[in-house]
Image (spheres, rainbow, N blue to C red):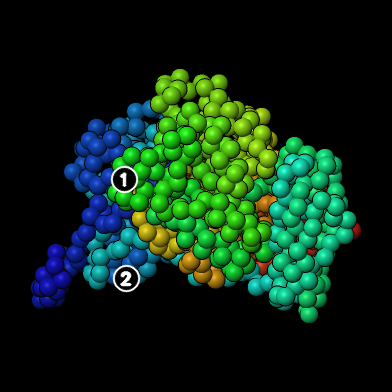
Amino acid sequence: MSRSNHHLVRVTALLILALPAIASADEVWLSSLDLTKMRQGWGEPHSDQSLMEGPITIAGRKFERGVATHAKSTLWLELDGEVTEFLASVGVDDTAAGGTASVEFIVAGDGKSLWRSGVMHHGDESKDIRVDVRGMRSLLLLVMPTDDGVNFDHADWAEARFLYDGAAPVAIVAPREDPVILTPKPGPAPRINGPGVYGCRPGNPFLYRVPTTGVRPIAFTCDNLPASLSLNTEMGIIVGTAPERGTYEVMLRAKNHHGEASRSFRIVSGDTLALTPPMGWNHWYAHYNRITNAMMREAADIMVSSGMADVGYQFVSIDDCWMNAEEYDDPLRVGPPRDANGNILPNQHFPDMRGLTDYIHAKGLKAGIYISPGPRTCAGFAGSYGHEAQDAKQFAEWGFDLLKYDLCSYGEIIGSSMTVEALKKPYILMGGLLKQQPRDIQMNLCEYGLGDVWEWGKEVGGQSWRTSGDLGFELNRIFDVALANAKHAEFSGPGSWNDPDYIQIGYIGDARTTGMPTPCSLTPNEQYAFMSLWCLMASPLFYSGDMSRLDDFTINVLCNPEVIAIDQDPLGKCAPVIPLAEETFAMVKDLEDGSTAVGLFNPGEFAVPITLTWVDAGLSGVRIVRDLWRQTDIGEFSGKFEATGGRHGVVMVRMSRPDKDS
Ligand code: GLA
């Protein structure tokens, strides 16, 4: 109904006083609202159709209209206080024939539950709802899975509609908290950050920029540096040749007009690289097939100027689309894959690969590159298949320090026989070749967790491996993705990292459309939770957003050295998950100094108190609790710790014994 018609109806209603109240209201179908804002556990919401694209049917009864979704499903609506009623018939769709379907429908207004269906199973008759929502400003339509999991939880809001007097309800992604910056800016005095331990291979080139916050100029010095290494005292960059096999305890020092700092740094020259999870930036989720040499250099500049390098970000990594394709929209990316000798050719956006890595290295940073073991990359560019040895040598000669090896078209080579042996083969080949190069090159296995890669990624020469598909497609499921990744905790350790994909906050492009970067849809609470989860899991920390548009809030989430220290802890533990009340859970991570990092997470839709008892956490005695995001001590606790977890939020703390820990 148009706005003018709406007024006409109101006037008429006033004149004919005897009309029932409902006649004065407009009506809008839920299925006509913007359902792209709906979040759900599987598939996409469907309007006036079941998830399987037939008619909406509950216990044999067909409905013309409605919204089909899948638990867990949330749809938030903004109301103007003049929406009067929400009506619907709800139930599990008949297409959920697997037998285990069971859900609960919940309608909540302004943070309080207004109506609950109770548990509904496949085959149960629909339940009619008529909920008074007068005066409400926000409404949540929620479908929760039950204890039997989410399989087949096809849930219908059939005949769902609103009656309203003012404006129609508007679907929103979620109510957004204010983007409060919790982390204090670094002080003027030096503070040395980054890992306490660093792995290298004897005789290879060595490069390490000492991550240090504080006002420049800073004078760097160090004690006990192996003779084959030297420190640039102005820039704080250690270069040279990795020493003979052995462990070297170095003391790093930094001094400026405001104070001084020191920190021990253990160099372990041996077989293992990435003794702590690699940190850096990768271009993919910001720039996709638009990446150029100039953008890579700009990212390296900003890694330093933004302060990211001062808290430990190190790799500047190019992803797909640097090679030639046979056909492509952008003619500068089209050309022969290789020269007459079979050497791979970068496309015209990358005129000088060695120049690019020299530029990155001159800042004390490291360079990452990408290719597929198949004939083509995921985006259709030249792959390594049949040229692996040449490519490994080329990457080393160009000066790269990390290779992301992305399975993609290798499926064409192994066909349907995706056995573990077949999946391992290209990685054994490339892992061996990289080890033979006269420089340290890490390998990131990107094969989306196939063949339980966490069980063999290290043995084939990898330091990290993706445990799932592309997170860009699943950003609304960061808790689920993290919980799945955390299941492989036992495979986490020095030189062995489960990789749940990149941190995508700030400005990122939509992975579905590979569009231009826009502000990410994650709420501030979700962004704090994202970074906290990744650090507690000892995940590689690669930011993948537009470096040229980093704002203060994004920097605050990415660059808190006390939070990053949890990720970089030398023990390399991935925190086990401890389920708590309702949907809340804790992650509890043992740290090298005997203290414990704890994240209290609330994936639920409303703020709730979260209590972690010492019994659940395996703790004892008194603990000094420090809020890591705010960098403040909260107090001493014994027996339990309780905090309020905001919607999709986290409270992240470090717990130390008063006597033992610094
Ligand atoms: C795959 C990977 C992504 C990215 C793209 C590039 O989808 O999983 O991380 O590298 O390929 O095409």
Q: Amino acid at mark 1?
A: Tyr
Question: Where's residue 218, x and y in %?
Answer: 75, 72
Binning the other alpha carbons within 10 Å of mark 1 as few (below 14), some (14 to 19) or many (20 upward) gives some
In this view, the residue in front, 74 or 427, is 427
Q: Is mark 1 within 8 Å of ligand 1?
A: no
Q: Quadrant of residue 497?
A: top right
**Identity of the residue drawn at 45% across and 46% down:** 346
Q: Quadrant of the C terminus?
A: bottom right
Q: In this rendering, is residue 585 above or below 547?
A: above
Question: Where's residue 142, x and y in %?
Answer: 40, 51
In this view, the residue in front, 374 or 589, is 374
Q: Quadrant of residue 194?
A: bottom right
Q: Quadrant of residue 460?
A: top right
Q: For the residue labelled by badge 1, is the local secondary structure a helix, a strand or a loop? A: loop
Ligand 1 shows up in the quarter that is top left
Binning the other alpha carbons within 10 Å of mark 2 as few (below 14), some (14 to 19) or many (20 upward) gives some
**Identity of the residue drawn at 82% across and 61% down:** 252
Question: Is residue 611 toward the left or the right of residue 106 in the image?
Answer: right
Residue with the most extreme bottom position:
257
Give the mark nearest the N terminus, 1 or 2: 2
- The residue tagged 2 is 80
In this view, the residue in front, 610 or 422, is 422
Q: Quadrant of the N terminus?
A: bottom left
Instruction: Measure the C-alpha gap from mark 1 to mark 2.
Output: 49 Å
**Identity of the residue drawn at 59% across and 69% down:** 305
Contact, mark 1 vs mark 2 (Cβ under 8 Å): no
Q: Which mark is residue 228?
A: none
Is residue 519 in view? yes
- The residue tagged 1 is 328
